Amino acid sequence: QTVVTQEPSLTVSPGGTVTLTCASSTGAVTSAYYPNWFQQKPGQAPRALIYSTGNKHSWTPARFSGSLLGGRAALTLSGVQPEDEAEYYCLLYNGGSSNWVFGGGTKLTVL
Amino acid sequence: EVQLVESGGGLVQPGRSLRLSCAASGFTFDDYAMYWVRQAPGGGLQWVSGISWNSGNIIYADSVKGRFTISRDNARNSLSLQMNSLRAEDTAFYYCVKGSAAGTHYGMDVWGQGTTVTVSS
């Protein structure tokens, strides 16, 4: 059973930069895991931000970017806005077992 | 505008069945994979199942394999999830999610608003 691990919580100041990471118990995350990132605010459905490591959707703000960093998938927010306060989930594909696994989520506080 | 509208949720006793549906509009339905994702009350997201554009590839989480069946009707732009032998731990908000591509290994983009499933006696 693959376990995907994210930082439980992070705090960032408005205008600052923060990087959220996503690790897999199966080893280093590569592009073959097709990392996806989602944002969820209280009472709302999740919203997709990033697919296949670093590709943005048409609605994804420019301040969000995805990458691979030190064997993990990473989501970087540059110039954080107050409205970025939310829960962020990563999603990884396990090709060996043909399934998807979400991370436990990172609660991002903008303070 | 892409829209996904789930229906069929409700209160069901353990061991019984329930069928969720998702009506899709605003995009070429048979060009994309589709997924179900659930979220327990106060919990995180859990991927449940996925189906490729032509139903040729179907995948399930281990926790629902053998109990849940995903299907799609491209002529009706609809996705379904037949849930049998329901357990208390299946209690969650269930989301219908559009895939980012035709296959089941590229990820997801647009989410529906979800439907609640409560399994309790």
Image (tube, coloured by chain):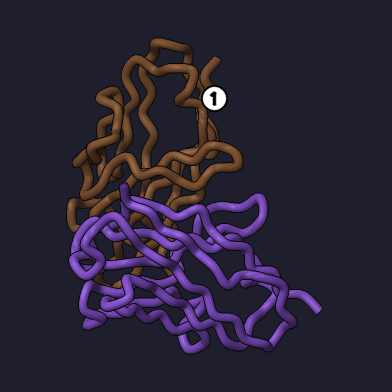
Chain colours: A brown, B purple
What residue is at 63 percent from the left and 82 percent from the top?
Answer: B86
| In this rendering, position of residue B2 left or right of residue A1 | left
Residue B75 in the image, given as x and y percentages of width and height: 27, 78
| In this rendering, position of residue A88 left or right of residue B29 | right
| In this rendering, position of residue A104 left or right of residue B103 | right
Image quadrant occupied by the C terminus of chain B: bottom right
Task: Tell me if residue A33 can be seen.
Answer: no
How many numbered tags mark residues here?
1
Q: Nearer the viewer, residue B24 or A56?
A: B24
Q: Nearer the viewer, residue B3 or A86?
A: B3
Q: Secondary structure at mark 1?
A: strand
Residue A38 against residue B81 in the figure, above or below: above
Category of crowding for the residue at label 1, using alpha-carbon neighbours closer than 10 angstroms: few (below 14), some (14–19), many (at least 20):
some
Residue B90 in the image, given as x and y percentages of width and height: 62, 72
Q: Quadrant of residue B54?
A: bottom left
Q: Nearer the viewer, residue A9 or B84?
A: B84
What residue is at 60 percent from the left and 81 percent from the top?
Answer: B18
Task: Tell me if residue A40 can be seen.
Answer: yes
Q: Which residue is mark 1?
A: A109
Residue B109 against residue A96 in the figure, above or below: above
Residue B119 against residue A28 in the figure, above or below: below
Identified by mark 1, the residue type is: Thr
What residue is at 22 percent from the left and 45 percent from the top?
Answer: A53
What residue is at 29 percent from the left and 33 percent from the top?
Answer: A60
Residue A64 against residue B84 in the figure, above or below: above
Q: Chain of mark 1?
A: A
Residue B11 in the image, given as x and y percentages of width and height: 72, 73
Residue A85 in the image, given as x and y percentages of width and height: 51, 26
